[in-house]
Amino acid sequence: MIGGRREGGLMRKASQSVVKSTILIAVAIGISIGCLFAFLYPHGFLSFYSPAFHSQVLSSKCESSHRLNELKAEYAAELEKNEELRQQVKELTEKVRLAEQKKDHAQKQVEALGKWRKAGPSGTVKGLRTNPTVIPDEPVNPRLAEILEAVAVGRELIVALANWNVKESLEIWFTNIKRVGITNYLVVALDDKITEFCKSNNVPVYKRDANDGIASIGRTGNNHAVSGLKFHILREFLQLGYSVLLSDIDIVYLQNPFDYLYRDSDVESMTDGHDNMTAYGFDDVFDEPAMGWARYAHTMRIWVFNSGFFYIRPTIPSIELLDRVAGRLAKEPKSWDQAVFNEELFFPSHLGYEGLHAARRTMDFYLFMNSKVLFKTVRKDDRLSKLKPVIVHINYHPNKLKRMKAVVEFYVDGNRDALKPFPDGSEWEW
C-alpha cells in the first residue's frame, strides 16, 4: 500500500514537471517569434502593406544604389591614384639604382680589375688600360652564337656588311682574305642575293631575320644608311662575348691583321691621317693677332679614326660606344656615322655632357694603310713601296674597284707599274 502511494505521487510530480516545461518552452517560442517580427517589421506588421512603407523601401534602395555608384567611382579613382604612385615608385627606384651604379664607380672598377696598390716611385706608374670583357649572353641571339662558335678563332673574327650593290668589291675582299689564310671572318648579308653568292663561294655568311627593321634598311638604304647599321649589328657580337675586327668591303688584305693587334684598348682603329702628326696628334697653334701678346693659342689636333676598319673588344665602354652612336644616328639621320663615331670617342666630359670612358689606340698607318698614304706617298718612295702593308683601305678615292684591283696587281702579282696610272687624288674619276 505504502509502495503504491509513493509511485502514484512520483507520477503526479513528473506529469506536473512536464506540463511546466511545455509551458515554458511555448512562452520562449512566443517571445522569440515576437522579437523576430519586431526586427523585420519595426513599423508594425500591417504597415508592410502600406504605400508609405513601400515608398520608404524604394527610397532606401535608390539611396543605396546612388551611394554604391559613388563608392565605385571613388574606388576607381583610388585605383588610378595607386597606379600612378606605383609608377612613381618604379621610376624613383630606377633612379636610385642608376645613382648607386654611378656612386664610387671608379673605386668599384679598381676593385674589379685588381688589388689596391701604392703609387710607387716616379716613372714606374701606369694607369689601367684594358677593361674586362663582358660575360657572354648567348640567349641574345642563339642562332648567331652557334655561327660564331664555328667561325671565330680565339673569340675574335673579321665582320663585314654587304648587299648586292658591292658584289664585285666583296669578291676581291674575300678572295684576298682566303689567299692570306684567314679563316675567322663572316659576311653579314643584307639581302638574299649576297647570301646565296657567299654560300656559292664557301664564304661564312649570316643573314638577319627578314622581318627585322635593320635588315630592311640594309636592303634599301644608301651607303651612309648601310654604314650606320654596323653599330646596331655589332652590339650582338659583343654581347655574345666576341671581339670584332669591323671591315668595310673596299679593303684589300695582304697579311693577317690579327698578328698585328695589341688588344689593350676598347677600340683599336686605323686612322685617316697620312703622317705621324695627323695620325697620332700634334700641337696646332691658332694665331689671332687682335689678341696682342696672347695672340697664340695652342690646340690639340688629331685626324679621325676610320669607322670602316677598327677592332673592338666586348667591354662595357665598347657597347656603350655602339649605343651612343646608334642612338645619335637614329635622331640625326643626316649625320655621318664616322663623325659621330669620333665625337663620342674623343669629346671629354663637360657641363651637361658625360664623355665616354673608353681606352683607344691608333693603328700604325703604314701597316693599316689608307689610300691617301698609298697613292700620295708610298708608291713614290722606293723604300716604302717595298714594304707590304697588312691591309689597304680605298677610303679616299671613288672608283674603288679599279684601285682595289691595282693594289692586288702591285703587292700580290708584283706589277710595279700597276699604281702609276692613278692620280694622287680623284680629279679624273669624277
Image (spheres, grey):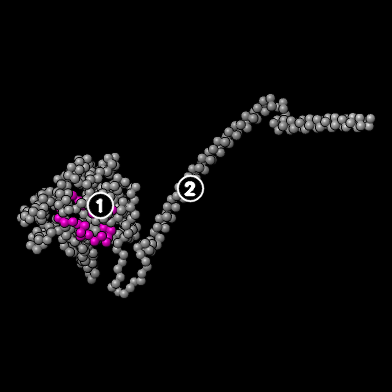
Q: Quadrant of residue 297?
A: bottom left
CA gap between label 1 and label 2 equals: 49 Å
Left or right of 102? Residue 149 is: left
Residue 137: image tag: none
Residue 152: image tag: 1
Identify the image quadrant of the N terminus.
top right
Instruction: Report if residue 214 lies within the magenta region.
Output: no
In the rendered structure, which segment of residues is drawn in magenta? 242-267
Q: Which of 76 and 152 is in front in this view?
A: 152
Q: Residue at x 83, y 31 (%)?
A: 18
Left or right of 398? Residue 220 is: right
Amino acid type assigned to the residue bearing label 1 in the image: Ala
Q: Nearer the viewer, residue 188 or 101?
A: 188
Amino acid type assigned to the residue bearing label 2 in the image: Leu
Residue 85: image tag: 2
Q: Locate residue 190, reporting x and y percent.
A: 23, 43
Q: Which residue is drawn at 18% across and 42% down?
A: 200
Secondary element at tag 1: loop
Q: Which of 336 and 14 is in front in this view?
A: 14
- The correct choice, above or below, for 17 with respect to 255 in the image is above
Q: Residues within 10 Å of mark 2 (few under 14, many from 20)?
A: few
Q: Which residue is drawn at 40% across and 60% down?
A: 103
Q: Determine the residue located farthest toward the bottom in the rendered image.
A: 121
Q: Locate residue 77, reporting x and y percent.
A: 51, 41
